[in-house]
Amino acid sequence: MTTPANAPLKSPTGQPTGTAAAEPAAPASGGGAPKVVARQGVLSAVRPDQQPGDGRYPVAWLHISAPGRGAIPTATSRCTCGRDRSAVGHRQVHALIADHTAHRDLCPLRTASQEGRTAA
């Protein structure tokens, strides 16, 4: 199927001759602009938290990634007191887990809150 290079791809439509001005839109029936009615919605208010909590919040995080058999595990231990440690490999991850557990008892942020609880 061969077509000449200058053959039109679509059916030609009639081309207007000369220029014509745009016609104004017909006026809307009813005289004037359409009226917009605002919806009356229900007033919303921020409600108090339904679960107020007991005053506890996270201080230290231990993230362990052990992807599967034959893969090398990694771990990170972070605390809001500024402690940030990481480990790669089985031995180092196990050591970091033990260190993180020991840090929970020695962290100045946790021991300060515990002293207030025992005094009360």
Image (tube, helix red, strand yellow):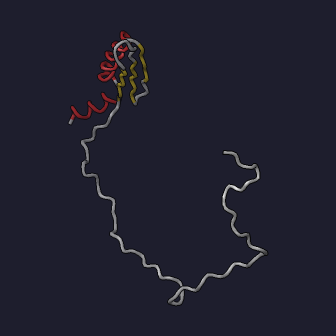
Residue 76: x, y in percent?
40, 22
User: On the rendered image, what quadrant is the C terminus found in?
Assistant: top left
Indicate whether 113 appears above or below 31: above
Which residue occupies the foreground of this view, 65 or 112?
65
Q: Which quadrant: the N terminus?
A: top right
Q: Is residue 80 above or below residue 76?
A: below
Which residue lies at the image location 47% right of the left edge and 82% below the top edge?
35
Quarter of the image for residue 106 reads top left
Q: Position of residue 43 (x, y in %)?
A: 34, 68
Most foreground residue, 95 or 57: 95
Position of residue 10 measured from the top left corner of the image (x, y, whole percent): 66, 58
Q: What residue is rendered at 40% in x and 31% in y?
A: 80
Q: Residue 62 appears at what percent x and percent y?
A: 35, 25
Seen from this angle, which residue lies furthest front? Answer: 1
In the image, what residue occupies the spot 39% across and 14% down?
Answer: 71
For image coordinates 52% across by 88% down, the residue present is 29
Q: Residue furthest right?
A: 18
In the depicted structure, whether residue 19 falls above or below residue 62:
below
Closest to the observer: 25 or 33? 25
Residues 116 and 72: in front is: 72
28 horizontally vs 75: left or right: right
The number of callouts visible is: 0
Specify the quadrant of the image occupied by residue 119: top left
Quadrant housing residue 117: top left
